[in-house]
């Protein structure tokens, strides 16, 4: 099977940077007092629970031989009280830590989502969106158990181990030494699987990312898939990716499953030795051990290995979480290439003069898209860009909105370099309609109002009427309050463009950018739309990209873009008279239409 882009795994880190755990600690820090309170509560509960085996020792060695039923009843009541207190403490811990854990998860997810909002177009151009989505949802969710229970349980279990060893020493130091002999064996197991386990979870996170990315693309492209009868080929690709994920997951959990059985095996071995030695010392002529002490000590053995088993599980969860943390913080650390310069000011109210001074731009180093672009767009005039696909027309208008940074040169609006003002103050005064008419889930009213959240219903309807969208919207079952799905699957391509057009116009911008605004509109609607546009373009500096030259005949200036530069510029009549590239493009379209 041919290799596809979703087979390409991300680079794995050989060593874990401890600073990533410190960064996670920064999210935990606001809740340290509440967590400390939970830890104190759980430690008090554990300390009381540790007394229970001593109660049984006294019952076996003293109160039963003395037939002291009052003391036996007292020990039973104390045991019941300790159990009730432990149950209440456990309920409080679960409730509190669940709230804290989810708050931390929310904070991490908010940070990564907010950062994604700031990243430039180039970041999304280079990555499948499914790979980005899996980091925001799946990877962050995978930290939930670690944050809700793992941290507090680990601190509590470590303290419990100290208490348990202390009580074991009180019971019998000799048996305590035998029990502790199992720890070096467990340390050897941990050293053996540590590196292998972390690498296995890194690979698993990669395979999960690949699978999620392909599923997202397949859903978005389902119409194309079914149109070209690609179901079988897509199933093969999916089965390959899913199989790789399954294998990676099975290998990762294989290492997880080593810890639990290893702890159980070491516990069984040491417990066997303790029973053999304990019974031998009980039966010895000098009887250096009592039955009560052995019973109490064997109770402590279970309590000794239980937190170790829990700690082993936490260790597994930590290694799993580390592989996800690497990806989460990698996304948060992704540099924001297009951002406000230090000391950037607020863009004053725009009048509309736009100037390109020796602007050069490239998406990839060494492959220049625009080379030394120079032009001045006067306030309130309409400028059109034409030329072959890939010539750089959309790039020029994207640079005006600062969706990308220029390699060199300057872009000025009203004489102000746009790199010296805040992006927010710049873009809020511009209206942009992209070539991809994206429709969000929600009502049509909400989609149009997206460009101006303060607009009234009447203003929304007025904008829709201007772009000839009112008629088809009114005919829908709930009019402007009709619910549409993501990407507007219920709408035709032309209807989506008209709604996007109304959205851009409702913002009432001083600079209006229309990137292939009429490419999906039929000729009859285009004629009606052109009438509304002629009124709306008055008083605005407008930039229009169009392949259909009939839509830009009235532009104040038309620029033919190709080979990284502007080959010619002028009005429609002037360019036709020159019989240059624009003339050839116009004639080719005229011949095609006739």
Image: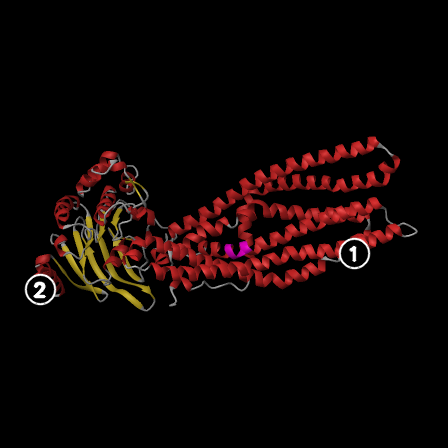
Q: Is residue 226 magenta?
A: no
In the visual, does 372 lie left or right of 144? left
- What element does badge 1 sit on? helix
Front label number (1 vs 2): 1
Q: Nearer the viewer, residue 234 or 76?
A: 234
Q: Which residue is mark 2?
A: 578
Question: Is residue 347 in view from this perspective?
Answer: no
Labelled disc at residue 229: none
Q: In the rendered structure, which segment of residues is drawn in magenta?
A: 320-324
Mark 2 burial class by Cα count in 10 Å: few <14, some 14-19, many 20+: few
Residue 449 appears in the rendering = yes
Q: Quadrant of the C terminus?
A: bottom left
Asked if residue 178 lies left or right of residue 228, the reply is: right
Magenta-highlighted stretch: main secondary structure?
helix
Q: Nearer the viewer, residue 433 or 480?
A: 480
377 or 212, which is in the foreground?
Answer: 212
Residue in view at x 51 percent, y 42 percent: 103
x then y, percent, for residue 528: 13, 45
Q: Which of 55 and 98 lies nearest the eye of the viewer?
A: 55
| Label number found at residue 273 | 1
């Amino acid at each position: 099977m041919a290799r596809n882009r979703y087979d390409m795994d991300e680079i794995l880190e050989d060593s874990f940077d401890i600073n990533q755990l410190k960064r996670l600690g920064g999210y935990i820090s606001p809740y340290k007092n509440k967590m400390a309170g939970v830890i104190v509560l759980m430690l008090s509960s554990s300390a009381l629970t540790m007394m229970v085996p001593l109660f049984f020792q006294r019952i076996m060695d003293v109160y039963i031989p003395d037939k002291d039923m009052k003391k036996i009843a007292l020990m039973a009541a104390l045991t019941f009280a300790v159990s009730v207190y432990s149950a209440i403490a456990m309920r409080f811990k679960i409730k509190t830590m669940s709230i804290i854990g989810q708050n931390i998860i929310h904070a991490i997810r908010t940070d990564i989502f907010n950062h994604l909002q700031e990243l430039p177009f180039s970041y999304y151009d280079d990555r499948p969106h499914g790979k980005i989505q899996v980091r925001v949802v799946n990877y962050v969710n995978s930290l939930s158990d670690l944050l809700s229970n793992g941290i507090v349980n680990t601190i509590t279990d470590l303290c419990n181990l100290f208490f348990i060893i202390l009580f074991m020493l009180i019971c019998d130091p000799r048996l305590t030494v035998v029990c502790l002999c199992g720890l070096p064996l467990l340390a050897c197991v941990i050293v053996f699987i540590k590196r292998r386990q972390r690498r296995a979870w890194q690979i698993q996170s990669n395979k999960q990312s690949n699978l999620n990315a392909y599923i997202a693309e397949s859903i978005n492209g389902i119409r194309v898939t079914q149109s070209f009868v690609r179901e079988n080929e897509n199933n093969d690709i999916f089965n390959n990716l899913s199989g790789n994920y399954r294998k990676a997951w099975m290998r990762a959990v294989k290492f997880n499953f080593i810890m639990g059985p290893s702890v159980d095996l070491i516990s069984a071995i040491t417990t066997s030795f303790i029973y053999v030695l304990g019974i031998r010392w009980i039966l010895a002529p000098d009887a250096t051990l009592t039955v009560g002490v052995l019973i109490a000590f064997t109770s402590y053995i279970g309590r000794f290995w239980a937190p170790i088993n829990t700690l082993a599980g936490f260790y597994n969860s930590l290694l799993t979480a580390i592989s996800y943390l690497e990806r989460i913080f990698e996304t948060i650390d992704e540099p924001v290439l297009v951002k406000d310069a230090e000391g950037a000011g607020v863009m004053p109210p725009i009048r509309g003069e736009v100037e390109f001074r020796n602007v050069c731009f490239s998406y990839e180093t060494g492959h220049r898209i625009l080379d030394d672009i120079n032009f001045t767009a006067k306030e309130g005039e309409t400028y059109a860009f034409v030329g072959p696909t890939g010539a750089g027309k959309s790039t020029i208008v994207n640079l005006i909105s600062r969706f990308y940074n220029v390699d060199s040169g300057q872009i000025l609006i009203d004489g102000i370099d746009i790199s010296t003002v805040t992006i927010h103050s710049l873009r809020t005064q511009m209206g942009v309609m992209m070539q991809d008419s994206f429709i969000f889930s929600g009502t049509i009213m909400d989609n149009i109002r997206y460009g101006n959240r303060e607009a009234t219903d009447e203003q929304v309807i007025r904008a829709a009427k201007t772009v000839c969208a009112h008629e088809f919207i009114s005919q829908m079952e709930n009019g402007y309050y009709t619910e549409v799905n993501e990407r507007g699957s219920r709408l035709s391509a032309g209807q989506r463009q008209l709604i996007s057009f109304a959205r851009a116009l409702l913002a009432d911008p001083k600079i209006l950018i229309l990137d292939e605004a009429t490419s999906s509109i039929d000729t009859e609607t285009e004629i009606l739309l052109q009438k509304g546009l002629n009124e709306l373009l008055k008083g605005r500096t407008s930039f229009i990209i169009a392949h259909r030259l009939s839509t830009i005949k009235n532009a104040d200036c038309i620029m033919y873009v190709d080979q990284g530069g502007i080959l010619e510029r002028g009005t429609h009549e002037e360019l036709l008279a020159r019989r240059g590239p624009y003339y050839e493009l116009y004639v080719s379209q005229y011949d095609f239409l006739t």
